[in-house]
Image (cartoon, grey):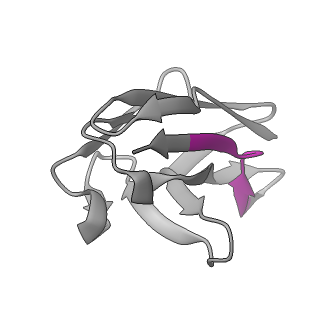
């Protein structure tokens, strides 16, 4: 099983980006999917999670600016980010709890860099 994230880049403050993440391999079921981020010198922090049923949990710092969605038929999760701020600069990691090989396990993508210039 592999998570592949894409969509990061350099954007000016106030701009927008959309991140995508695809789960591939022997994926039989996925519970939560989501995004975490880690800025230089900081710990990895939760950005947002989405359940299989579509319930969401956003970090206060991104509420109203970021929107998560998922396509269960494609095993994909997306993060639409608008009104980006310099403090959103970080490596963004997608996450999924996946059922494979008769067990549930946590999987992480490789990280995609988001840089917001002021």
Would you say 15 lies left or right of 115 here? left
Residue located at (28% from left, 57% from top):
62
Quadrant in the picture for the N terminus: top right
Residue located at (41% from left, 52% from top):
86
Quadrant in the picture for the C terminus: top left
Residue that extends furthest to the front in the rendered view of this protein: 118
Magenta span includes 110: yes
Number of labelled discs?
0
Residue that extends furthest to the left in the rendered view of this protein: 64
Where in the figure is residue 76, as x and y percent of width and height?
A: 53, 29
Residue 116 can be seen, yes or no: yes
Magenta span includes 36: no
Query: In the image, which residues are magenta?
Result: 104-114
What is the magenta segment's predominant secondary structure? strand
Would you say 78 lies left or right of 2 here? left
Would you say 23 lies left or right of 9 here? right
From the viewer's side, name the closer residue of 42 and 57. Answer: 42
Residue located at (60% from left, 64% from top):
39
Residue 90's place in the image compared with 18, above or below, is below
Residue 6's place in the image compared with 62, above or below, is above
From the viewer's side, name the closer residue of 35 and 97. Answer: 35
Residue 32 can be seen, yes or no: no
From the viewer's side, name the closer residue of 30 and 34. Answer: 34
Residue located at (54% from left, 21% from top):
74
Would you say 92 lies left or right of 66 here? right
Where in the figure is residue 69, as x and y percent of width and height?
A: 34, 35
Where in the figure is residue 5, as x and y percent of width and height?
A: 66, 34
């Amino acid at each position: 099983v592999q998570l592949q994230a894409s969509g990061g880049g350099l954007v000016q403050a106030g701009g927008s980006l959309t991140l995508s993440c695809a789960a591939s391999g022997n994926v039989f079921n996925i519970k939560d999917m989501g995004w975490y981020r880690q800025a230089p010198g900081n710990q990895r922090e939760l950005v947002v999670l989405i359940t299989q049923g579509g319930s969401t949990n956003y970090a206060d710092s991104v509420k109203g600016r970021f929107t998560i969605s998922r396509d269960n038929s494609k095993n994909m999760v997306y993060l639409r980010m608008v009104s980006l701020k310099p403090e959103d600069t970080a490596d963004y990691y997608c996450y999924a709890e996946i059922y494979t090989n008769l067990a549930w396990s946590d999987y992480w993508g490789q990280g995609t860099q988001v840089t917001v210039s002021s």
